[in-house]
Amino acid sequence: MVVIMAGGRGTRIAELFPNIPKPLIPVDGIPILEREIRSLASQGFKDLILTVGYLADKIITYFGDGSQLGVHIEYFVEEIPLGNAGALFQLRAKMGKDPFLLLNADAAFDVDFNRMLEFHKKHGGLVTLFTHPNSHPYDSGLIIANNDGNVEKWISKEDERPQWYNNRVNAGLHVIDPKVLELSQKNLEIDPTTGYPKGKVDLDRQILKPLCGTGKMFCYDSPEYVKDMGTPERFHQVEADYKNGVVQAKNLYNKQKAIFLDRDGTINVDKHYVFRIEDFEFLPGVFDALKMLQEAGYLLIIVTNQSGIARGYYTEEEYKKLEKWMNNELLNHGIHISGSYYCPHHPEAIVEQYRKDCDCRKPKLGMYMQAVQKFSLDLSKCYAIGDKIRDCHICELTECKGFLIGNNEEAGIIKNIHQGKIGNIRYASDLLEAAKEIFNSSHR
Ligand SMILES: [Mg+2]
Ligand SMILES: [Zn+2]
C-alpha cells in the first residue's frame, strides 16, 4: 500500500503555474505525480491512496481510478484541513498490518522502494526515513543517527543545530508500520464522537520525532534522486534532470558508478595521523577534481584506514568530528560525499578494542564491499584513487580501475605503475589529473 500526500499548495512554484495543483505541474510535458506513479507501478506498487485537498477535483479528474497507468487509485479528500498526518488515522482501516509507503508529492523522486522496504524489514523498526545529502542542509530537517542507522535526534529547521553535522536530511519519503498510529494516538487528543485525533496532526512533530532515541526509527541513506521543487530555480533543475535521464538513472534498481577516495595524501596533505581541524589542509585542485567527478555522475565514497584510533593517537569521536568538518567544507564547494568508511583497527593496536586482524583495513576489501552493497555499484565502472598501492589493491582483484597519485608510494612501485605493470592501475600526479582522465574517458 502506498499513501501519497498530494494535498499541498505550491507556494513559490505557483507563480510559474497558476491554478495547477503541484502534483499536476508538468515536468518536461508530463505531470510530476504521473512520473512518480509510473515509476511505482513499474516496481510493482499498484495500490495507491492519494490524499488530496487543494484543487482536489483537478487531480481526481486527471488520474481517475488509475487504470490508465496500470494502478488502482483511491482518494481521500480532506474537506477540513487535518494536517499532513490526520488522514492516516481515518485511513487506518484500509491499511491492514503490513508496513506502507508514505510519500510526499511535494518532491520529485525516483526511488527503488523495494530496496527501502527490504532495509525496513531487516532493521525491524516501526519507521524508516529516507535520508540523503541535499544542497541546503542548513535550512532542512536534519537526522542524527548512530552507526546502525538508529535515529537519535531530529533537528528541525527552527531548532538550534550543532556546529558540525552530517549532511543527512529527511526527504519526506517513509516506510511506516501502521502500529505507529496506535502508538501515537496515546499522545494525541482523541475526539470521542469520531474516534480520530482532534484538529490537525503534524507527521514530523507529533508522530515521528517522538520515536527518536527509542530504537524504533531508522534512517535509510540513499543517493537516489529526491528533490524538492519548491522554488522556480529548483523546478528548472528538476526538469533538466528528467530530460537528461539523471533522475531515472539514480534509482538504485540501476547499478551505480563511484569513486573510492583515500583521504590522507589524496584529499588532504598527509601529515601522519591528522585528526585536528587546524592540521587538515586540502591538497591543491581537490575541490575542482571532486566537482568534476560528481558532475560526471560518480558517487564519491571515502575509504580510509584510520589506525591512529587503534594506536591511541585519537578517538573515533575525534575522527568523526573531523569527518563532519571536512564534509561541511566540501559542501561549501557544492560537493556531496555519499559514503564514508573508515577502519579504526590494527593487528598490534594499543587500544584493545581495536586490536584485530579485521577485514576492513586496506588492502583488504571489506569497506569497498560494504559500499558496493549499499550503493548498488557496478565495480567495472568504478575507480579507486589513493597515494598508496594498498588503496588500489581492489583493482588487482576486481574489474575496478584505479589511479595511484602523488609521490608517497615507493619509487619502485610508482615506476611499475608507470609501465602499466599492475593491473588496472594508472599513475596521475594528483587527484585533479586523475579526475580529468576519468572525465575524458567517460565522455568519449
Ligand atoms: Mg593515503
Ligand atoms: Zn578494520
Image (cartoon, helix red, strand yellow):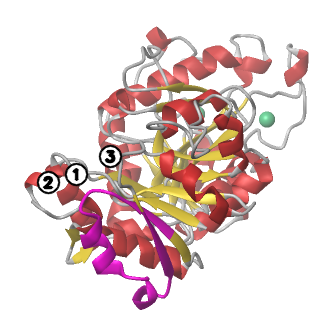
Chain part drawn in magenta: 49-76
Reply yes or no: does residue 145 show up in magenta. no
Q: Ligand 1: does it lie within 8 Å of the C-beta at label 2? A: no
Reply yes or no: does residue 75 show up in magenta. yes
Please state which of residues 30 and 267 is positioned toward the viewer in this rendering.
30
User: In this rendering, is residue 313 above or below 401?
Assistant: above
User: In this rendering, is residue 297 above or below 391?
Assistant: below
User: Which amino acid does the dot numbered 3 rest on?
Assistant: Lys
Q: Nearer the viewer, mark 1 or mark 3?
A: 1
Left/right of residue 399 with respect to residue 366 in the rendered view: left
Q: Which mark is residue 14?
A: 2
Asked if residue 422 can be seen in this view, the reply is: no
Q: Picture coordinates of residue 34 (x, y %)?
A: 35, 75
Helix, strand or loop status at disc 2: helix
Identify the mark nearer the N-term, 2 or 3: 2
Mark 2 surroundings within 10 Å by alpha-carbon count, few (fewer than 14), some (14 through 19), many (20 or more): some
Image point (64%, 47%), residue name: 128
Image point (55%, 39%), residue name: 197
